Amino acid sequence: MIISYYWPPLGGPGALRPVKFSKYLPQFGIESVALTCKNIAYHSIDEELGGELKNMKTFRTESLDPARILYLLGIRKYHPKKWQLPIKQAVNFPDNKVPWLPFAYSAARKIKFDAIFVTAPPFSSFILAYLVARETDKPLILDFRDAWLEFPFMPYKGEMQKKFVSHWEKKVTEYASRIICVDENIRNILIKKFPHISQKISVIPNGYDPDDFQTSGKPTIFTIAYLGTIREERNPKRFLESVQALITQNRIPETDIRIKFIGYIEGRFLKEIEKYKFTKTLGHLPYIHAIREFSSSHVGLMITTGNQYFFPSRQNEYLASGLPIIVCGRSKGIHLLEEAFQKGYPGWIYDYDDIDGMKTKIFEMYQDYRHGKIITGETPYKQFTRENLTKKLAGLIRQTL
């Protein structure tokens, strides 16, 4: 049984990762069922994503969490507001999805399964899965898409929150049969805290499906594309200023360059982006459309700041696109890209405020484009296809049975 609060018709990395695992598990002799929440108000909807799953049974339960209540009140798309942050912070034990637990727990006890695979965040799902595993005496596999106690997007504050989360993190990780982390940084921090469980922790990164990257040609305007969410630690301000400087200096015509943003953009950053005439915002697209829209550009743009727990989930997809990549900002969370660049993939990392450096590289690549030079790369991580990574997961599941 796969427990995932985020599931189609929701889009984004939270739904994508378990869906891709579910797509390929049958090839390795493992059938899965999904336990999830009924429809919620959410910023990223992907009606097509669930179409990849053939004859998979999904159990949807009620919930009293805020996103579900908003949906019941008629709100379909939810965009977080800054004033709501203190409220979310106050109920961060370990998140605001706790009201889903009693409904999901009741449903899980009626489902037939041999093992539990649970992906988080929300981390209350780990508590749910632990309780179900204890009740049914079935093996438990935890999938960390982010670090828990060190969760960067809604940090735990105050002694009470940190003690609560530390207690449950220790409890569920020690009980679990297997632990999977999306990144080596998460594995390292878990081993540092719980060295006695190191042997049961594995890393399975987010991968890519080669067939998703079909394109129908390049645009006639020099196009740089960003794929993913735009929020505080991915603020495009400095990169856009670099492009604007080239236009102001008459080095690139404003009509001959476009910066394309594919994915959800938080409100205040949307205003910042749209004040430039050379930008184009496409919002959240169905996954396949988003990948192909990105791949049809000339250059990929990655923006990242923060500590090692801020790691963009799309790194393997960026590399699979073959696009040269400019990275604005530095973080230990982009080590997959950094290592790929060291192996020869065309990519360059600049300090977030290095406007001159980014200007120089953008202009150089624009000149290449004008002279018909198409720079492409080949991912050094060909083993990280979704199919191969699911094969590894299937092997770990079998070890628990």
Image (cartoon, helix red, strand yellow):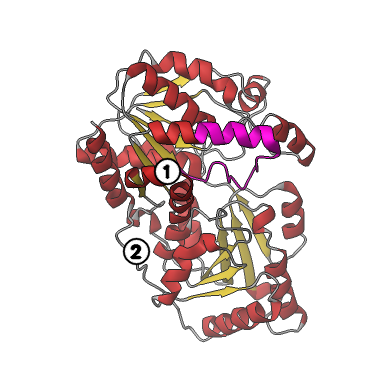
Given the image, on which type of amino acid does mark 1 rest? Arg
| Residue 103 horizontal/vertical position (percent) | 51, 16
Mark pair 1, 2: CA separation = 18 Å
In the displayed structure, does residue 196 sit left or right of residue 25?
right
Callout 2 secondary element: loop
Instruction: Tell me which corner region of the image, top left, top right, bottom left or bottom right, holds residue 248.
Output: bottom right
- Considering the image in quadrants, where does the N terminus appear? top left
Given the image, on which type of amino acid does mark 2 rest? Tyr
Residue farthest along the right direction in this orientation: 83
Count of labels shown? 2
Q: Does the magenta stretch include residue 145?
A: yes
| Residue 227 horizontal/vertical position (percent) | 55, 57
Instruction: Specify start and end residues of the magenta stretch as a single range.
Output: 144-169
Callout 1 secondary element: helix
Q: Name the residue under label 2.
A: 381
Q: Mark 1 points at which residue?
A: 17
Instruction: Name the residue at 32% across, 20% down.
Output: 137
Please tell me how crowded label 1 is: few (under 14), some (14-19), or many (20+) other residues with Cα within 10 Å: many
- Considering the image in quadrants, where does the C terminus appear? top left
